[in-house]
Image: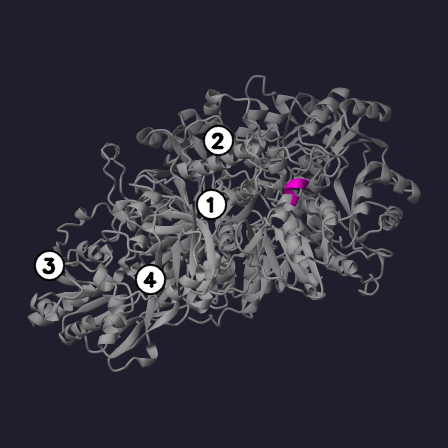
Amino acid sequence: MKAFLILEDGTVFTGIHIGAPKEVISEIVFNTSMAGYPEVLTDPSYAGQAVCMTYPLIGNYGVCKEDMESKKAWPDGFIVRELSRIPSNFRKDLTIQEFLLDQGIPGIAGIDTRALTKILREKGTMNGMITSDEHYDLKAILPKLKAYTTGKVVEKVTCSHKYEIKGVKALADNGPLSGSARFDPDAYALGRREMRPSLVKKLNGAGKRVALLDFGAKDNIAVSLTRRGCDVTVYPAFARAQEIIAGGYDGIMLSNGPGDPKECGSIIGEIKKLYDTDIPIFAICLGHQLMALATGADTFKMKYGHRGGNHPVKDLATGRVYISSQNHGYVVDMDKLNPLVAKPAFVNVNDGTNEGLSYIGKPVFTVQFHPEACPGPQDSGYLFDRFIEMMEVGKEEKNA
Amino acid sequence: MPKNPNVKRVMVIGSGPIVIGQAAEFDYAGTQACRSLKEEGVEVILVNSNPATIMTDKNIADKVYIEPLTVKVLEQIIEKEKPDSILPTLGGQAGLNLGMELEESGFLASHRVKLLGTTAATIKKAEDRQEFKDTMEKIGEPCAASKVVETVEDGVAFTSAIGYPVVLRPAYTLGGSGGGIAHNQEELESILENGLRLSRVGQVLVERCIAGWKEIEYEVMRDSAGNCITVCNMENIDPVGVHTGDSIVVAPSQTLGDKEYQMLRTSALNIISELEITGGCNVQFALHPTSFEYCVIEVNPRVSRSSALASKATGYPIAKVAAKIALGYTLDEIKNAITGKTYASFEPALDYCVVKLPRLPFDKFITAKRTLTTQMKATGEVMSICDNFEGALMKAIRSLEQHVDCLLSYDFSGLNLEELQERLKIVDDQRIYVIAEALRKGMDYDTIHEITMIDHWFIDKLALLVEMEKRLQQEPLTVELLKEAKRMEFPDQVIGRLTGIPEEKIRKMRYDNDIVAAYKMVDTCAAEFEASTPYYYSVYGSENEAEETNPPKKVLVLGSGPIRIGQGIEFDYCSVHATWAFAKAGYETIIINNNPETVSTDFDIADKLYFEPLTPEDVESIVRLEKPDGAVVQFGGQTAIKLTESLMKMGVPILGTKAEDVDAAEDRELFDRILEETGIPRAAGGTVYTAKEAKEVANRLGYPVLVRPSYVLGGQGMQIAISDAEIEEFMEIINRIAQDHPILVDKYLQGKEIEVDAVCDGTDILIPGIMEHIERTGVHSGDSISVYPAPTISKGVKEKIGEYTRRLARALHVKGLINIQFIAIGEEVYVIEVNPRSSRTVPYISKVTGIPIVDLATEVIIGKTIRELGYQPGLQPEADYFAVKMPVFSFEKIRGAEISLGPEMKSTGECLGIAKTFQEALYKAFLGAGVDLPKHKQMIITVKDADKGEAVEIGRRFEKLGYTIYATRSTADALHEAGVKARKVNKISQESPTVMDLILGHRIDLVIDTPTQGRDKSRDGFLIRRTSIETGVNCITAMDTARALVTSLENANDQFTLIDIASI
């Protein structure tokens, strides 16, 4: 079946329909990761957006449910050059085609995704519609596209109630260390797949309790903490600061999430209250932006954002450059940063935009990129250890 | 970190002659690095024995030494030039080994020379098998169970503990020479013994066999501050067991999920960090196909063939960045030259798929085993880029120029399912064609996968191509179907064959329906940032983004495709120089080529680069878009020449010598007429198509005769026949290859072979110099030792050659380059062959005479005259030094290849010896080719009867040098009679000790074995020669070569005269 991608500027791409049989209007963004489409599809930060993969061959290894970064897929639509006819990987549970159908995500394949990417790069992120109606009426559709706004998406993606995930008690519980996984044919015959290998080599988080505010958290944020031994309590986005503070946590983690940070007015207010305590806080992506807004800084929408797994960020404390996983359309405005409140901790080597802040006189640091990876490079995973050290210092000070 | 101010004079070590496993990629890397160093104001002293390279040009380095790559030579150059640092990581394994030896001996320290980039300790950690294993264990990176052994006994004992099969990898060798997989003790002993000998340090790694696992590579960069990135990863379609240089490789990996991709990426970064590599590095992994288990196979702490491929596949200039890192810069300080916006500290994102195919030499070595193993056999490779895998594979196949254009090109339709299953077990260069046939016959994916271990995903892609073949055969050709076939890059010719519709009609149908190739840009960032570097690949069914330009003048330069025996790096040298000369004259330049190892496919050589197959259809698509004012074909070897007719049909003027004149030189009758008009003699001969005609001509001329196909390079298929039976045999072989052109049969004349390259402006000619071959006619010019200036011919002969060259160039209306081969017999000069185009010797003669003939030829093509360019026409004055070009072979890599020299070219590369005297130049040339004698002062002579007289003379001279001579019976008798002491040894079939035992005893320096006239079918001679080569013994098959060698040894000297080529 034919499908059409109609952009706000009137451009129409003709391709074939994939996924769920429905029509959708969404904000069109592109992601440059060459692997990791199941993680992209299940990243809640994509709520309210339709994702175009710039890598042309998608679905090659099917979908493994273990790789899902949340309970479901979130994008409104999926745009690819070509879907693989067969999935080939020992862990696959279903094909990409089945997954899109199961998750109710419509999409379009067979279009020139590079041409689409260039339009978005030149004109900026814009809205679009994926439809299979051959008799679409541009005149009627374009005003609708222009009028479309993503709206408040955090409430859509956050968990409904608080829950706890216990940290591992022994390193061995994490499964095999990266690369050392032995193939077990008996287990394989029973349908049991190898655990994904772990990178964590120390249980430095043992005994620490962390509150994780879920604005649309990717699972690997909690996993990165629990594998280090931390007990994590996940709170819905609209949890009151008072309740969290009362929980007596060693640290607070603010997660990633979708949408315009400025739409999260009430959450920002609560974050300010958390900031005012001396509890160590580590924030990622949307969490980083919300903390900046809570402390008087500003954010703005980027022309087409950063989405991919190849962005270099520089740790200004050490001068080291790391390749990071990124997914954001908004960024903290460095020009309006109060140097008495926070100073830049990371900067994007390509375009010089802010990638992290370190708060003056507070055990608070935040990053724009994704140290939890999944998908993308694992280079900045050390930041979780840094957070654990902060909690350690905090604990010692409390005890002293 | 900014540039280190203490680095002012850097010596760069090149990789020497082209051999299998070490090819043009190091010219590409070295050239890029030297330019990058010079850009930083650093003085560059370059040493490389290979004259066919661009890196040895005087505008690339400040001082250029084309000298043998040995420790002694390098020491003398260091003493003379006093560099403050040396960069050894750009010259492949050869350069790295030399750098290590200089460091280990303490020479560098005592002369205050620093090793730039990666340290010696790091190199040792990565290259020494045991240290590498220990290091990997320390950081928890898994290696396959293995042990480094120094004796065969140890190897056998260890293997009995871990079980067969095992993989054997000798330390410090290139292209995996001497390695292999042993399935039983017998195989183990044989491979191990050989490997121990070939290893520089006498070590071989015996390792658990992980054949069948996925082979994945990462190209990693690290700077001195510890910042690491991966440039790209690559997946070998052929699982572990086939050398990556012989594998079909795809970038990026296709069948890895993010978990696997990142797991291996993290591992690669851990490894490069632990090894503290500064610069580029290649990490190879084996990944279990059904678990997360992996093993680190190997780390190359230097720029490699894979890194050249990764550079071209991503647009990330690895060598350039590695050079800047060596100077002290960090990745975040180096600008990405492609985007001009981002920095070197980012990872390229691909929005296309890259396929690399090896160019294997089995068309040259028809007796060789085609099987692919852990020892590399490919002489070159092609790469193609497309936005789908099927298209990339199809484009790569036709880029090979091996008479293949689709998965039907090798016919296995005669095999039934059962036979196909058996055939699939053979791992060779035809495996994908066998899989295709198996799919046609309905074999299921699982069966194919179980036999080949090739991933289902790739099998499915082959199946998609097979399904398209079937649809084209069975369905009516609709516009929709045509679109789909073109998206998979089926060429019109193949569509024509499958549908039965003439190619012309298909082309028209395409144009009528606007089904044309679109061009996309390689921009390193998947379109995320604007890029300005026009590096393009074609796709169908997408929007074109190649910007149309309308400069005053636009020229198309056709490249020479993959490196193969007979058409090597020399033609890339010519293409690049022509491109530069056109650019200087104000032309916009466009290069089309598909070889990822070359300088010509670097993104900043031409104004526009199209990375595409060099077939008429692919070229036409580019021509339609670019509408060039003209094309030059005379610099791109036979690949480009073959496109002449098609270009003319497209309406593109051929710049320089006209196509009809090129034809006149190849067409027997036309050429004979020209010779008659110009009064130039040649060997009598005739043109034939069939064996019957050939025999008639041969008998008329009298044997021996030379039989060869026309329109080939490197004497492919050329043979000397001495009987009707041989004619029949050779004609059969020649006709096996599709043959549209006639076959030439000439009377074989024995004499001195002379070669000239000249530039002609239509009126005047310029001959930079005359080259004389050491070997008599009958040995292909590319395999002969060539000397400039010609040492033994008279002034009269030289004048005659000059005059004949002038007459021929004018009669053929040459505008540009011409190459002529002559035979001199006494004062008589005959012409053998005329090629109105650039030749293999062009870079060599340009360098040793200091006359840039490609640049001059280009200027002439543009319209200047030789006089206007400031040159006096005619034969130029001779130099006051000698330059000897020595062929270099890769026989040890090709099991079963016949090594004796003949009219068909077999060498893969060349090196140069240049000195004040002929003898020293000759000695240096042998040294550069790896003939470093004497060692044990023992040799074997076994020659055919006709050579016995010369054997006596040569034997006597070796005897004087202190050699003990062993000889087979009749040779020994001849030597004895003449008073040369020779010990008689038994033939192989006789009782021990035989000649074979002697060779295997490892105390023989040299074997002189001349095969009987024609093709030597005696098993003995073949076995002796093969065994010599495989055991690392020098083997000479022509008496002239043997004489040259003894002459050079008589004049052996440790102190060399060093000549800076840049000052010529």
- Which SS class for mark 4? strand
* Amino acid type, mark 2: Ile
For disc 1, the marked residue is: B250
User: Magenta span covers which residues?
Assistant: B504-508
- Quadrant where the N terminus of chain A sits is top left
Which secondary structure is most common in the magenta stretch?
helix
CB contact under 8 Å: marks 1 and 4: no
Chain letter for mark 1, please: B
Residue sitting nearer the eye, A321 or B495: B495
Task: Give the Cα distance between marks 1 and 2.
Answer: 18 Å
Asked if one can make out residue B568 in the rendered structure from this viewpoint, the answer is no
Residues marked 3 and 2, same chain: no
Amino acid type assigned to the residue bearing label 3 in the image: Gly
Mark 3 neighbour density, 10 Å: few (under 14) some (14–19) many (20 or more): some
Q: Can residue B393 be seen in this view?
A: yes
**Local secondary structure at mark 2:** helix
Foreground of the two, A97 or B933: A97
Chain name for mark 3 = A
Name the disc covering residue B435, or none. Answer: 2
The amino acid marked with disc number 4 is Asn
Q: Are marks 1 and 4 on the same chain?
A: no
State whether residue B98 is above or below residue B200. Answer: below
